Image (cartoon, grey):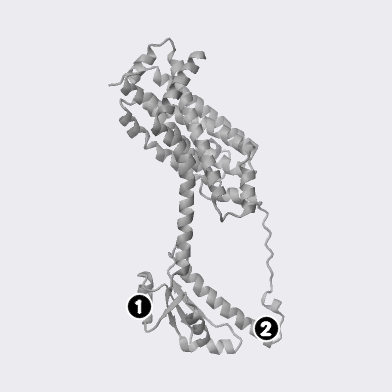
Amino acid sequence: MRRIWIIFRKEALDTLRDRRTLMIMVGMPLLLIPLLLLAVTRIQSAQFEKAERQQQRIAFFGIEYAPELYARFEADERLLLINGIEEDSLVNMITSEELAGAVLVAPDFLIRIAGDQQAQVQIIFQGSDAFGTAKDRLIDLIEAYDREIVNERVKRLKLDPNLFDAIKIEQTDLATMQEKIAEAVGGFLPYMFIIFGFMGAMYPGIDLGAGEKERGTLETLLSTPAARLEIVIGKLLVVMAAGVATALLALLGIFLAMHSFPEMPAHILDVITDMLGLRMVFFLFTLILPLTAFFAAVILSLSIYARSFKEAQSIITPLNIAIIFPAMIGLLPGIELNATTALVPILNVALATKDLLAGSINPFYLAEVYVSLLVLAGVSIWGCVIWFNREATLFRS
């Protein structure tokens, strides 16, 4: 055990001296995540405000059938009404973005309105508009005019306003605010710390295997009294520590980013703060630890196998895709933690985290997740030790 600690301390010091590793471990999760989230939020807000201010080009057909409605459109400074357009060319002009939309009033509009009947107005728009501003503006103006007509009818005919709502729908949402937030961000959070946990383990793992081969220090280490098992365990602990630290820093970065949003409602921020308390961080740590042990064992095995640092990078970097895929599945709606998904590596961590955040975790499935992760970590570490003991692997040429 003493030799393992000496090797661990030696490798940890070497890792902490590497600026590139420190940047990946600390700089990216703690600084880059809040900056990226803030930047994305600012850009999205700016784009939305720009879309709201932008004047939309709209074609209006049937002015003579609905002059009052046309006057409302004409008075809205956000709309620029374009006349003299052929109705046959509408579709092409909207799809080519020459027009943002069009309004077509039925010829019998005034007759049906005067007869206290329902009149028809058609709107045409491009559904791929990122913010849907054209559609919303057209609908808002028409609905405002509709409310005035209905209110006038109710007043003139001395009708009960409730007559128009034969059924009143009372909505009762049983989901707590914590469950709603967990559903919204519960998949995103584990996705981030899984990815950063892998990235945090990747560079130290490459350096402690292929990097030592290149520097010629691996042979020196093997000539010490320490057994190969002690050497590989010491290296694994360093890689694991780097991965866990990076994952937790990523979690801290997300927490700081959410507290940096001025638009974040106070009650939602309070719920998030309670969700990410010490108890939750402890549970997340217990999930991250065996998963990172698996990452560390795989990375170190491949790093020891590689002839050089560059070869190790080319072998290990594509594994990001294999890590991202199950993590992304956890983001999909309808994918829940059950007896089967609890056995799927990475996906089980994502789904268990989502349920833990919602406070609705099934203890049996959580125990299954822990067992599967511990078995996976144990097998991968055992495989790494076997791999490290092979001369053909260590001195591959």
Give the percent coordinates (x, y) of residue 284.
57, 36
- Checking the image for residue 89, the label placed there is 1
**Quick one: 165 or 188, which is closer to the camera?**
188
Relative to 243, is 357 above or below? below
What is the crowding at mark 1: few (fewer than 14 residues within 10 Å), some, or many (at least 20)? few
Q: Quadrant of the C terminus?
A: top left
Relative to 144, is 348 above or below? above
In the image, what residue occupies the spot 56% across and 76% down?
Answer: 143
In the image, what residue occupies the spot 53% across and 86% down?
Answer: 68
Dot placed on the residue nearer the N-terminal end, 2 or 1:
1
Q: Is residue 345 visible?
A: no
* Amino acid at pointer 2: Val
Relative to 170, is 355 above or below? above
Give the percent coordinates (x, y) of residue 191.
49, 42
- Checking the image for residue 23, the label placed there is none
Give the percent coordinates (x, y) of residue 369.
57, 34
* Amino acid at pointer 1: Ser
The residue that mark 2 highlights is 154
**Quick one: 106 or 288, which is closer to the camera?**
288
Q: What SS does tag 1 mark?
A: helix
